Image (tube, grey):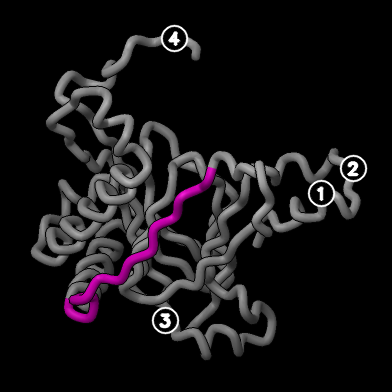
Amino acid sequence: MTRDVAGLQMLWPTPLLTRSLETHLSVNAALVEQFTADRAAYPRPGNMYSSSDDILQRLASPALEELFAFVSQSVFDIAQAMNAPIWQSSGSSKLQMQIVGAWYQFQNQYGFHDIHNHGNCSWSGVYYVQIDDLVTRKAHPQIGATNGVTRFYGHQLGLLGGAHMDMGNAYLQHSSVDVTPEAGTLIVFPSWLNHKAMPYDGVKDRIIVSFNAQVHGERGNQTFDYGFH
């Protein structure tokens, strides 16, 4: 939280979109059944299980179609919010949002996914299909409040190890944000944003769907002349 100061500019914001799927109860129930069967067909040991990133091609179903109609609109909305003036000046009249990879993941027994980001796309996201309720997760004797959360890391994370810290740049210490997972919630974020699935241990498996997306113009991506400005 900053105070209004004349001449102060807050540059390079990091957008994060959070939305809930209204029909998530029926959609999630169908997805849990579908993903559980698919996982059984391709068993692998361990407390983290990730499918291949082609579930939209392999596992066509009404539930996945409904989810990704919601995902597609959400990605387009955040991309439009961030790019609208640029899109308008480019003269592009037809923009296409494309999901270039989608996969599901099971997590339990202290499984986690370490810090990473996503390549070959402009937007990524996570949709929570199943997880223990917040009260149950927070009551975990070892993990507590961070049980199963998704943690996002700010630009300044890499500076903290070498920067001189004093009261003038204390704001840099706020280098991460935890998003509380809830079944039916979608988070869309820039693909370059570092994030981590924190360790999870629960009664139910933590099941998510992740995806990568691109947005293209009718003339491809060379909408503007390339150069330095």
From which residue to which does the magenta span run? 13-26
Residue with the mark numbered 3: 204
Left or right: where does residue 137 sit relative to residue 38?
Answer: right
Quarter-wise, where is residue 133 in the image? bottom left
Q: Are marks 4 and 2 in contact (CB under 8 Å)?
A: no
Q: Are marks 1 and 4 in contact (CB under 8 Å)?
A: no
- Disc 4 vs disc 3: which is toward the camera? 4
Q: Residues within 10 Å of mark 3 (few under 14, many from 20)?
A: few
Q: Residues within 10 Å of mark 2 (few under 14, many from 20)?
A: few
Q: Are marks 1 and 2 in contact (CB under 8 Å)?
A: yes
The tag earlier along the polypeptide, 1 or 3, is 1
Residue with the mark numbered 2: 164
**Picture coordinates of residue 41, whole percent (x, y):** 25, 60
| Type of amino acid at the residue the image marks with label 2 | His
Secondary structure found at label 2: loop
Quarter-wise, where is residue 62 in the image? bottom left
**Picture coordinates of residue 86, whole percent (x, y):** 32, 30
Residue with the mark numbered 1: 169
- Residues at marks 4 and 2, CA–CA distance in whole angstroms: 35 Å
Tell me the tag on residue 66. none
| Type of amino acid at the residue the image marks with label 1 | Asn
| Type of amino acid at the residue the image marks with label 3 | Lys
- Disc 1 vs disc 3: which is toward the camera? 1
Q: Are marks 1 and 3 in contact (CB under 8 Å)?
A: no
Secondary structure found at label 4: loop
